[in-house]
Image (cartoon, helix red, strand yellow):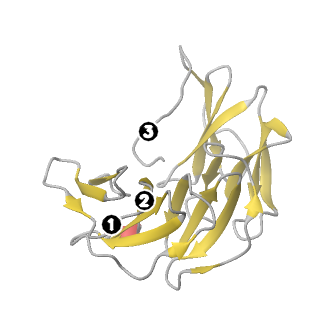
Amino acid sequence: SNDGRYGGMGFYDGKLRWGATAGAAFTESAGRHANGAGVVSFGPGGDLVWSAGGDATLRAWDARTGAAVGQPVELGAVATALFVRGGRMLAVLGDSVRLLDTAGRTWAGPAWKAAVWPLVGVSQDLSRVFVADPADGKRVVARDPATGKPSGPEYRHPRQVKSVFSMKTRDEFLTITDENIGRVWDGRSGRLAGRPMEYETAVDAIAFDGAE
């Protein structure tokens, strides 16, 4: 969850389990996805748990009871990442992304071509999507989440970008390039927010407070 108190897991049996990271008993979803549950994200406030499965559907669950909330949403493709901010969600669907109004469970725009996960990140308020350019892997572009049109500065790198990580608590994002250098960027100005960080070995994933 956004405050770090809860964690969730998806399983091959299609069920979800989540609970307090401090070690309390887990809650289990009352229903399941066909073909496994692969992506889990907590809604603001931790009241809802969102999941996407191998059946290409999006489902919501009551975080306290595990009961299903509303009807499944057909995604049209298997999701590899979900970003929930306020009443909106960005679903990464292969090499495309699409914005969803979570209250009405209606699409807020068409799907648009992006880059495959993990080369996609979002701003704190989901007003911009940070996408590594498939045609120029050294460039990350800020785009409008509903239309995919450019919506902000470009972020130039000396080497190929291999991952983009969002931050939930600040309007910044982290990129890692193929020479194992991490850079934190100001999401509005396009400038670096601090000095680059060098890692001793290849970084395949990263997690820290306020990031995803």
Q: In the image, is residue 179 above or below residue 208?
A: above
Instruction: Pick out the residue farthest to the left.
Output: 24
Instruction: Pick out the residue farthest to the bottom.
Output: 104
Q: Amino acid at mark 3?
A: Ala
Q: Is residue 185 left or right of residue 166?
A: right
Q: In what quadrant of the picture does the N terminus appear? A: bottom left
Find residue 62 and report its horizontal and vertical position in percent. Answer: 29, 73
Question: Which numbered marker is on residue 46?
Answer: 1
Gap between marks 1 and 3 measured at Cα: 19 Å
Query: What residue is pinned by disc 2?
Result: 41
The numbered mark, 1 or 3, whose residue comes first in the sequence reads 1
Is disc 3 placed on a helix, strand or loop? loop
Question: Which numbered marker is on residue 207?
Answer: 3
Find residue 78 and report its horizontal and vertical position in percent. Answer: 57, 57
Is disc 1 placed on a helix, strand or loop? helix
Gap between marks 2 and 1 measured at Cα: 10 Å
Is disc 2 placed on a helix, strand or loop? strand
Q: Is residue 139 left or right of residue 28?
A: right
Find residue 46 and report its horizontal and vertical position in percent. Answer: 33, 66
Mark 1 and mark 3 in contact? Answer it, CB < 8 Å.
no
Q: In the image, is residue 189 above or below residue 184?
A: below
> Which of the 4 image quarters holds residue 59?
bottom left
Instruction: Name which residue lies at 67% across and 60% down.
Output: 97
